[in-house]
Amino acid sequence: MVPESVDESFEFINYPDDDVTGSPKYQEGRGQRSKPSSRNSEYGWLNDGESSRGPAVTAEMFQQMFDEDGRIVDEHSLRKAVFMGGVDVSVRREVWQFLFGLYPCTSTAREREEILLDYIMKYHEQKTRWKTMLVLDSKPGATPLEQGLIGRYQMEDPSHQLQSPTTPPHGVMSPIELHVKNESAARVSVDQPDFSILSKNFSNIDVTTPEMRQKIDFIKIQSQVFVNRQKVDVKNLWTHIRVIDKDVPRTDRDQEYFSGNCNPHLTVLRDILVTFAAFHPGIGYAQGMNDILARFLVVFDSEVEAYWCFRNYLDRIQEEFTEEGMMKKINLVVMLLREMDPELLDHLNSNDLGDLMFCHRWLLLGFKREFSFVDSLRCFEILSSHHLELSSMEAENARRKEVMKEFENFAYIFPGGGTRSEQLTVSLDYTFELFMCLALLMDCKPDLLTCVDSAMVFCTINGLKINLEETLTKAAKLFYQYCKKTVEESFLMIDPPKIAASKR
């Protein structure tokens, strides 16, 4: 029986039978609700386990998403496909170009040629600028290592270094001559713009044609104006370079892409990090950025594309690299755990472990250390799809459908007795990665309940054997259970008028 007030165009959500939080599914007095088969539910994959999340996005699937001009027709469908199955390695580079904002989904193939050319020239001018500034700030006769142009790990033989221009053996070099020679040396130290990635992306481009050379010259002037408007604080940059040169040689050296002595990819990694620090003084460089950049560099194998996607990603999460920002993020995990599993949080609080600081690495690196490198790439792209967020269409539809179920339930059991007691409040700060944290905590809840000190907690967390697909499925269940919980808490049971009158 469905009341007339219910909009029958809504499809009621059928949540998974197992409640991963262990909390009661229904409040007393609300009555049992029918549970149709998961096959009839949009969210049936949550019941079916690993095999039904969805296939990885393939080259064929990706090509079908474009119109004849090269625009992605439906960005939502792309992000949903990435969330459900990740991306096949054969097309990962192309998908990430859109996923991380290198190109707008609405751009045509022709427009992307112009965008990429602009990226190439701007990055080249930025890198040239900071290298020039370092040389000009150095002492006469300083080596590239002393100038900050390279790190010690980039040299085959540190005892035989090329010297920068020095004072001539007979006579004294004027300050102006020294300035000109140093500036020339700095510019020589920077390679020419890497136009090879143009042909990698657009096979029909020929950079040697007069028309293209004219276009490149024009964009170069624009890029120089863009870069020269930005101040480079050399003293501050040196502070970041020292930290970068400690972190770069330790970055994913177990991966073939970064393994071996004098690996050229480490040089690219360093140059990107220094370029970012030079032109983003508000955040500079912080430990962990090298791990994030390594993903982009492995996928794109292109300095320019890796830099701009890394920059776009950091623009969104840069606050999390500050102490205040990370504490805010961890506090959100605490708040979400309080809502979904107060028993576990109470236990941790009783043993002074309720700050959940052990979640710091999960959040900062996007669970990179919790999975193999291959799985960490899939996890990164799935989280970065932002398909399942509390501000997304999926969450809004889930809440609307659950509201209709609540009205139906009240009207059926207590005609005239159910009421919406308050406005629906949802914390949009609870991102999907926080539900991932919650899923991992639920996985080891029995063990955590036996922990009485931080050493036991860290031992438990570090001993987790995590399956990515299972964790994503559990996180999605928790996500939809939170949507359901927020709706239920906005309703209040009251006595129907007739029943209330009979009690007098």
Image: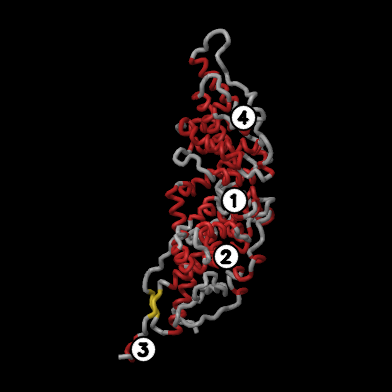
Frontmost of labels 3 and 1 is: 3
- Disc 2 secondary structure class: helix
Q: Which label number is shown at residue 71? A: 1
The answer, for residue 66, to whether it is visible in the render is no
- The residue at which mark 2 appears reads as 443
Which tag is nearer the camera, tag 2 or tag 1?
Answer: 2
**Eyeballing the image, is 346 above or below 227?**
below
Q: Earlier in the sequence, mark 1 or mark 4?
A: 1
Determine the secondary structure under disc 1: loop
Q: Mark 3 = which residue?
A: 499
Residue, disc 4: 191
Q: Residues within 10 Å of mark 4 (few under 14, many from 20)?
A: few
The image quadrant where one finds the C terminus is bottom left
| Mark 2 or mark 4, earlier in chain | 4
Disc 3 is placed on an element classified as: helix
Q: Position of residue 19 (x, y in %)?
A: 54, 72
As measured in the structure, the alpha-carbon distance from the residue carrying label 2 to the one carrying label 1 is 42 Å
Residue plotted at (63% across, 61% down)? 467
Q: Nearer the viewer, mark 2 or mark 4?
A: 2
Alpha carbons under labels 2 and 4: distance apart: 50 Å
Label 3, label 2: how far apart the Cα atoms are: 46 Å
Q: Position of residue 220 (x, y in %)?
A: 55, 31
Residue 91 is tagged as none
Using the image as rendered, state which of residue 56 and residue 356 is in the foreground: 356
Q: Residue drawn at (65%, 23%), measured in percent from left and top?
A: 160
Badges 2 and 4: C-beta atoms under 8 Å apart?
no
Q: Nearer the viewer, mark 3 or mark 2?
A: 2
Q: Position of residue 359 (x, y in %)?
A: 51, 56
